[in-house]
Each structure stands twice: as structure tokens, then as C-alpha cells.
Amino acid sequence: MNLFWSILIAFALGIIAFGIIGGCLFRGIVLLEKLNKKLNVLVPDKNKVTEVYESYLDDKKKEF
């Protein structure tokens, strides 16, 4: 009977630990998504000059 209760307690503690770890990981993903949205607002998009320059560099790399 002691084995049964030990298994039952270990099972319950395992579920609780899994819930805590899963909840922390989920919360971390949510916070990273919010941070990404805020940073996208702060960082301006590339302008046309930068895009043309980068495409020029890519074309030069392809020639070599």
C-alpha cells in the first residue's frame, strides 16, 4: 500500500511540476512576442536607398 501512495504522490507532484514549467515557458513566449511588437514599432523600416544598396551587394557576391 505504501508503494501505491508513493506512486500517487509522485504522479501528483510531477503534474504540478510540469504545469509550473509549462506555464513559465508559455509566459516567456508571450513576453517575447510583446517585446518583438514594441521593438518593431521603435525600429524604422529600411528605406529605399538601403534596399538598393543591399541588392547591389548581393549581386556583387553572386558574381564572385
Image (cartoon, rainbow, N blue to C red):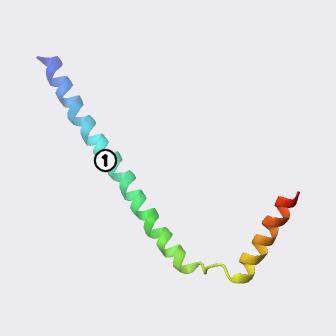
Residue bearing the label numbered 1: 20
Give the answer, above or below, for where 4 lies relative to 22.
above
Quadrant in the rendering for residue 7: top left
Q: Report the residue at 61% width, 81% height from top.
A: 44
Observer-nearest residue: 61 or 19?
A: 61
Point out the image quarter for the N terminus: top left
Viewer-closest of 43 and 12: 43
Q: Residue at x 53, y 75 (%)?
A: 40
Q: Nearer the viewer, residue 49 or 8?
A: 49
In the rendered image, residue 46, in percent from the top left (x then y), is placed at 66, 78
Amino acid type, residue under disc 1 in the picture: Ile
**Can you give x and y, in whole percent of width and height, for residue 13 in the image?**
24, 36
Tell me: 9 left or right of 31: left
Residue drawn where x is 17% and y is 18% of the image: 3
State the count of labels.
Answer: 1
Image coordinates of residue 62 in percent, x first then y, are 82, 59
